[in-house]
Image (cartoon, rainbow, N blue to C red):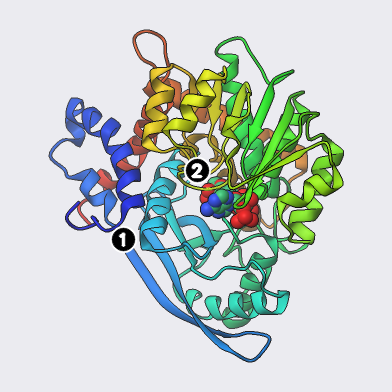
Amino acid sequence: KTRNGHEPEFIQAVQEVAETVIPYIAKNKIYSGKNILLRMVEPERLISFRVAWVDDDGQIHVNRGYRIQMNSAIGPYKGGLRFHSSVNASILKFLAFEQVFKNSLTTLPMGGGKGGSDFDPKGKSDDEVMRFCHAFMVELCRHIGPNTDVPAGDIGVGSREIGFLFGMYKKIRNEFTGVLTGKGRSWGGSLIRPEATGYGTVYFAQSMLQTQGQDFSGKSVVISGSGNVAQYAAEKALQLGAKVLTLSDSQGYVYDKDGIDAEKLAYVMDLKNNKRKRISEYVKKYPSATFHEGKTPWEVVCDIALPCATQNELDGKSASTLIKNGCICVAEGANMPSTPEAIHEFHAAKLLFAPGKASNAGGVATSGLEMSQNSLRISWTREKVDDMLKNIMEDIHDSCIEYGKEKDGFCNYVKGANIAGFVKVADAMLAQGVI
Ligand code: NDP
């Protein structure tokens, strides 16, 4: 805390892991006295750089770029880039720390990293976004590579941004390699990667529900966000027979009592991905729906809640409301969307609760599959990648049960995910010595 006390999100993420992992270390002598956790919380490398770019009116802007290379014990650094005005070292360190455990859980050989910038693509022209991405990559390219560090997308970084970033990397390095994931289909991308985080979150929730003899069919689902993760979580929930009631963005949420069906979801995808407009537009197109400005959707009665927007978007009070309204399952599509108070409420109520590092790991897992396809120079079918994704999510679920099941049969998925993720990285660090 003395070293990182000014970084609240990072402290929060570390605390959640420490609470479950420290007792495990105490019981397992091979990890005791090695200061493993202390080594894990210090990034191997933290890079911060100037990104200067010119807007459409000829004005010069300066943003701050980052790459946090957190842990490479089990593979090259891997983790997304976030472009959002809130980005700072604390947020990226929390994300990079979570990523180490998440990537370990996927069973694929990937270390953990994260990066991004306080640049906000909202309201910028395509040309401005391109100039920014190019300027960002001019610096980043010297720190990454297909065997060193392989970034991907995150909030504010989708297929458009990955395209611009990849183009500049290729030009500077004069090589066509799988240095980024989330690429377009015709230039090295993998089928199912765009869908993977949202689909994976629903697959994980389905596995949790099955432990209680339940599934998505006929259930009402409340989703926050309306970006990549939210859109595909909604799509998979619909395919499994659920009724999706809400989507949101940073201005508020839409509630559609008739359900957001496949046709309405296609409208949302076009609205957000092509027209880049606000979710409030939804009620103009579908007047029976309502828009709730400045609110989060957790007040809507539901069976399943999927927070898919951003960190700390679901607090203790919202958790109590969900529980009071009969919600039985919460699976995080976003990273750390539930506050510690909310997690406490969920655990006290013995509700099925999945932390993002387990339930949203499908995205990075499929990025790992994109890396494999790039190395082999082949492209797998949609069915094959989807099957592999499903299997990985089931394996992660099994690992959580193995380390998280308590004496009364309740599974603490937070504990399970943290310990399962920790063991693999810690074993590799022990084998490699003090470096
Ligand atoms: P997108 O940029 O596609 O969408 C983000 C969504 O969250 C938008 O609807 C956005 O609304 C909303 N949002 C962002 N910030 C806030 C905020 N402060 N308050 C309320 N809403 C907000 O990002 P993704 O869908 O890719 O990412 C969503 C979450 O999932 C993040 O936590 C990310 O780290 C996590 N994640 C993403 C993965 C991926 O593969 N993309 C993989 C694993 C985790 P608005 O447009 O108004 O900003």
Residue 412 in view (yes/no) = no
Q: State which quarter of the image contains the C terminus.
A: bottom left
Q: Residue at x 56, y 44 (%)?
A: 365
**Badge 1 amino acid:** Glu
Q: Which residue is labeled 1 in the image?
A: 44
Find residue 219 and report its horizontal and vertical position in percent.
69, 20
Q: CA distance from mark 1 to mark 2?
A: 29 Å
Q: Residue at x 57, y 20 (%)?
A: 327
Q: Classify mark 1: residues with Cα within 10 Å, few (<14), some (14-19) or many (20+).
A: some
Q: Which mark is residue 313?
A: 2
Residue 109 in view (yes/no) = yes
**Badge 2 amino acid:** Glu
Contact check, label 1 and label 2, Cβ < 8 Å: no
Q: Residue at x 58, y 30 (%)?
A: 299
Badge 2 marks a residue whose secondary structure is: loop
Find residue 385 and report its horizontal and vertical position in percent.
69, 41
Above or below: residue 431 compared with residue 65? above
Q: Classify mark 2: residues with Cα within 10 Å, few (<14), some (14-19) or many (20+).
A: some
- Hey, which quadrant is residue 360 in on the image? top right
Badge 1 marks a residue whose secondary structure is: loop
Q: Which mark is residue 281?
A: none
Disc nearer the start of the sequence (1/2): 1
Above or below: residue 252 compared with residue 183? above
Q: Residue at x 72, y 31 (%)?
A: 244
The verdict on label 2 being within 8 Å of ligand 1 is yes
